[in-house]
Image (cartoon, rainbow, N blue to C red):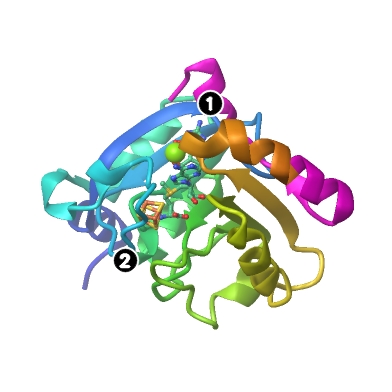
Amino acid sequence: MLMTDDILTSTTLPVMEHFYTIQGEGFHQGRAAYFIRLGGCDVGCVWCDVKDSWDASKHPQMSIENLVAAVTATPAKLVVITGGEPLLHSLDVLTSALQHAGLETNIETSGSSPLSGHWSWICLSPKKFKAPLPEVVPFANELKMVIFNKSDFEWAETYAAQVKDHCKLYLQPEWSKAATITPLIVDYIKNNPQWQLSLQVHKYINVP
Ligand SMILES: C[S@@+](CC[C@H](N)C(=O)[O-])C[C@H]1O[C@@H](n2cnc3c(N)ncnc32)[C@H](O)[C@@H]1O
Ligand SMILES: Nc1nc2[nH]cc(C(=O)O)c2c(=O)[nH]1
Ligand code: SF4
Ligand SMILES: [Mg+2]
């Protein structure tokens, strides 16, 4: 029979990078957070800001035990699992181990693969390139729509209509278009105050 410690040592995930920083986006923006960026994505957003993450085989496998140890070596209380598309992997064991260590577990996901894991907070960021699975959408605590062109506002509303009551609604400018798109987002939010602005603050202050 496998004991808990054996499961943690034998279960590995492809890790592109892991780092302690502040959450730059969305509801938890400004909080200290330990980021774990898993390799692998099958969504293919043309404007993705982390394309090097897509090929999982390029990234070393790390044991869950070593990942948890890296986080607990810092004062972090919050861990953000991102990628790549983290839901390409089964995240039950990783998130159980992190929660067992007393950590909050947040995820950044497109929702395009089946939901696994135990989550304190789910940030859903739907993509036209591979839409979220309908069964994932009701679990979102936060909907964060990247706005790349004007047609994305209408598309954002189709997801706002599907999330649960009290789900936070964010519009985030696509980074390369931020200078021209942000004023449109500001106008849109003034007319539709259920939405809030999410900026990628880490990119303005040059932290990871
Ligand atoms: C790199 S993705 C990884 C997690 C997951 N694959 C997803 O897309 O939600 C992390 C966050 O960055 C956002 N993002 C990616 N590229 C962006 C860009 N060029 N401008 C603004 N936000 C971007 C995504 O929408 C997502 O909310
Ligand atoms: N500081 C910081 N905040 C973030 N919020 C979401 C990110 C991501 O790439 O998932 C991210 C990131 O890469 N860095
Ligand atoms: S789903 Fe996320 S990681 Fe994948 S291409 Fe889109 S933004 Fe990048
Ligand atoms: Mg990022």
**Residue with the most extreme top position:** 205
Q: Which region is colored magenta? A: 186-208
Q: Secondary structure at mark 2?
A: helix
> As displayed, is residue 32 above or below residue 182?
above
In the image: residue 53, left or right of residue 168: left
The residue lying at 47 percent from left, 64 percent from top is: 127
Looking at the image, residue 143 sits to the left or right of residue 99; the answer is right
Task: Where is residue 31? Give x, y as percent.
Answer: 64, 31
**On the image, numbered disc 1 is attached to which residue?**
202
Give the side of residue 141 with respect to residue 32, left or right. right
Residue visible at 73% across and 75% down in the picture: 161
Residue 196 part of the magenta-drawn span: yes
The dot on residue 88 is 2
Q: Residue furthest bottom?
A: 135
| Amino acid carrying mark 1 in the image | His
Query: Looking at the figure, which quarter contains the C terminus?
Result: top left
Using the rendered view, name the quadrant where residue 65 is placed: top left
Q: Is residue 30 magenta?
A: no
Instruction: Give the image location of residue 63, x and y in percent.
Output: 23, 48
**Quick check: 23 above or below 118?**
above
Q: Is residue 103 above or below residue 117?
A: above
Closer to the camera in the image, 125 or 189: 189
- Which corner quadrant of the image does residue 11 belong to? bottom left
Residue farthest to the left?
A: 57
